[in-house]
Amino acid sequence: MMKVKQGDVQKLALLYERYNRSLFSFFYRKTKESQLSEDLVQSVFERILRYRATYSGSGPFTTWMFSIARNAHIDHFRKVKRRKEDELPDEERIAGEVPTGYEELDERNKKKVLLEKALDMLDEDKREVVILSRYEGLKYQEIAEIQGVTESAIKVRMFRAMKDLKVFVTTLSEEYNHE
Amino acid sequence: MNNRYEELIAGYFEGNLSPEEDQMLQQLIESGEIDLIEIEAMRQLHDQLDMIRVPQPSDEMSKNFYHMLENVQDKKSGLPNTLNSIATWLNEKLSKLTVARIGYASALIIAGFLIGATLNSNSEELEQLSGEMQSLREMMMVSLLEGPSTTDRLRAVTISATIPEADSKAIRALLFTLNNDESVNVRVQAVDALMRWSGNETVREGLVKSISHQNDDMVIISLADAMVELGMRQSAGEFEKLMKERELNELTKTKLENSIAVLM
């Protein structure tokens, strides 16, 4: 990244090859839309070029990159003025309808469906902590920098995210099996 | 449960507790202040999150990125994008007007002259940048081809499609992939990728030699199509040898017999 900052913009291609899938995965887990996620990945690399002078090199590059990714995601949703699901109270976010073909799935795949639904039901900050920690391998300290809070706050968010997830999985399982 | 306990448990999920923290957690579990069954259920969920997969991004994403990077390079090299834009605009507008065909032709000639004149002044720098871009892509391609992931190797082959002229290192890497990669998909894609540089003698010879290395019908059929397209008569002998030495399915045999007939 330091070379990109110094004007060797071709080196951005190396960063792209290393991180594009990780960024795509981050956006896809947030939006569930492939095309939008690809557009947001492109937006991140455009921003990296535009703001390269602000990169200090003091922390891990991924922390800076995911901060940009987070802002790109927030900006996008501000632009389209989409009503975010996490603005709804938990009761309303619990999906009522059983997914098509759920009953025919084996136990493992049922669990997968429940987890995926439950993860979507977490509020945005908690879900982001789970995504960055569990799927992108970031440390709590790095996530704290990205979200602009203390490491302790991130740990508390992670604990509460897992606690919520457990409740959502149980609730959904009961709902789906009851129907 | 207080925040300190929650932090401890989150550290436990991450597998990042210090010996002192670990001891503290054990004590809290023993004293019943933290419910072991509850945190184990959460830890299990934490582990099970691995089950949720995401799809792969499309090739279009990489194409868009490299397109963006090339535009940045163009701007950096001071190319007259305004002239390019004018030419594009003229092209789009005038092509729709049948009655203005003569004007259209004249405008293109003038625009071409202007762009050409300006490009000439930058051609050396442009050539250098273009060369650097190609080297970078070749470097990435070779590096990805050496990786353990099939997806990465397929991507490497895709990257090769954006390289107009390959150097010997890139050709060697693709030929090595064609002869040795464990994935049939990667090998089939490697045939297609090499065909883009079929004007290169090393590529043509490499494709013929690789026939004897193949044991999968899909790859053999791809090579047969490639040899017919290139009119490589010397490959007929290799295919005949292959038919004698290997057990091929009937469809592949028929395909090879037809290909040999065309080649001879």
Image (cartoon, rainbow, N blue to C red):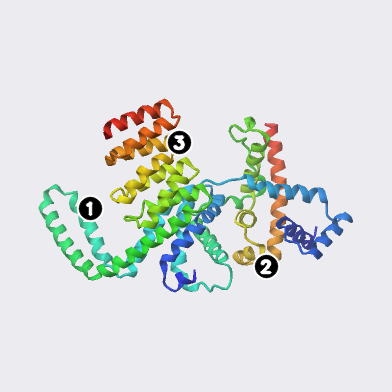
Residue neighbourhood size for the residue with mark 3, other residues' Cα within 10 Å, grouped as few (<14), some (14–19), many (≥20): few
Say what secondary structure mark 2 lies in.
loop
Which quarter of the image is occupied by the C terminus of chain B?
A: top left
**Residue B244 visible in the snapshot:** yes
Are the two marked residues, 3 and 1, in contact with CB atoms closer than 8 angstroms? no
In front: A102, or B14?
Answer: B14
Which three-letter amino acid code belongs to the residue tagged 3?
Asp
Position of residue B54 in the picture relative to residue B2 (left or right): left
Disc 3 vs disc 1: which is toward the camera?
Answer: 3
Badge 3 is on which residue?
B216
Find the residue positioned furthest to the right: B31
Residue B98 vertical placement versus A45 (above, below)? above
Residue neighbourhood size for the residue with mark 1, other residues' Cα within 10 Å, grouped as few (<14), some (14–19), many (≥20): few
The quadrant where residue A131 appears: bottom right
Q: Residue A150 carries which label?
A: 2
Which three-letter amino acid code belongs to the residue tagged 1?
Glu
Q: Which mark is residue B92?
A: 1
Residue at x 23%, y 61% (from the top left corner): B86
Mark 2 and mark 1: Cα distance apart in space: 55 Å
Which three-letter amino acid code belongs to the residue tagged 2?
Thr
Q: Earlier in the sequence, mark 3 or mark 1?
A: 1
Q: Position of residue B105 (x, y in %)?
A: 13, 54
Q: Mark 1 lies on which chain?
A: B
In front: B164, or A116?
Answer: B164
Q: Mark 3 lies on which chain?
A: B
Are the two marked residues, 2 and 3, in contact with CB atoms closer than 8 angstroms? no
Mark 2 and mark 3: Cα distance apart in space: 56 Å
Residue at x 53%, y 47% (from the top left corner): A32
Q: Where is residue B213 in the image (x, y as percent from the top left)?
A: 43, 41
Say what secondary structure mark 3 lies in.
loop
Q: Position of residue B144 (x, y in %)?
A: 47, 54
